[in-house]
Amino acid sequence: MEADKPHYHGHRDRLRARFAETGGKGLADYEILELVLFRAIPQRDVKPLAKDLLARFGDIGRVCAARPDQLTEIKGISEKVALELNLFQEVATRIAREQVTGRAVISSWSALLDYVRTALQNVSTEEFRVLFLDKKNRLLADEFQARGTVDHAPVYPREIIKRAIALDASALILVHNHPSGDPTPSHADIEMTRQVIEIGKPLSIVVHDHLVVGRDHVASFKQLGLM
């Protein structure tokens, strides 16, 4: 009977209708998260769960970028639901990466910054990536190099240059995040960058920049005069 339907059935229909009408404009963050959770949790009122996720992680970006083991600490979040949330982070990252793929990265700098922010600003552990560029500064490959703790990821400069040679790359942009939110380069960041530059120089492999992604800002070694 219609009267026996749980109250959230009507809520889901209304929320979907609001999204269809406005494209999401005017919906609260928890309501957008509800729409995501509808896909993975068909038989439950997910509004409290959406609010719990935001209370724990702070915003939608951090929710979707959280590791599955962090997400499943929240009561009601299964591994299936965690993967569904992570899917949206990966979709956002790939959309941002499409804006720099096939273009000269140096002349698409704002798109590059958007991409690295999308990929790394919400990640809770330090990750290190290298963008390998061809002679026209087009993106050949964007490769994950290392994942570490909240403040360190092990990086091996000779391995970076070895990989550049294998890809026939002419230039590099180093990228990593500071989960603390402060993108100020550390002494270890500066020393590692110096080593990559020195190893690459005799092989005509140029390091264009090292970008450190914080919560609200991306620090550029070049702009800071560190290279």
Image (cartoon, rainbow, N blue to C red):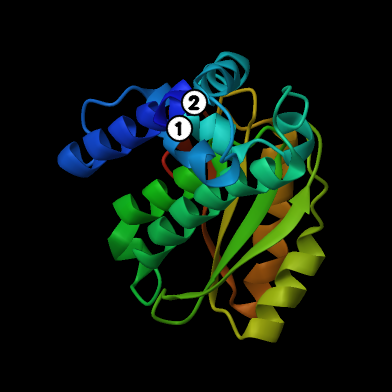
Q: Residue furthest top?
A: 55
Residue indicated by mark 1: 1
Could you say which is closer to the camera, residue 219 or residue 149?
A: 149
Label ID, residue 12: none
Q: Residue at x 73, y 43 (%)?
A: 191
Q: Position of residue 28 (x, y in %)?
A: 33, 22
Q: Secondary structure at mark 1?
A: loop
Residue 135 position (above or below residue 141) = below
Q: Position of residue 102 (x, y in %)?
A: 37, 77
Residue 221 seen: no
Q: Quadrant of residue 71?
A: top right
Residue indicated by mark 2: 4
Residue 60 horizontal side relative to residue 87, left or right: left
Residue 223 position (above or below residue 187) = below
Residue 59 horizontal side relative to residue 153, left or right: left
Could you say which is closer to the camera, residue 219 or residue 200?
A: 219
CB atoms at circles 2 and 1 under 8 Å apart? yes
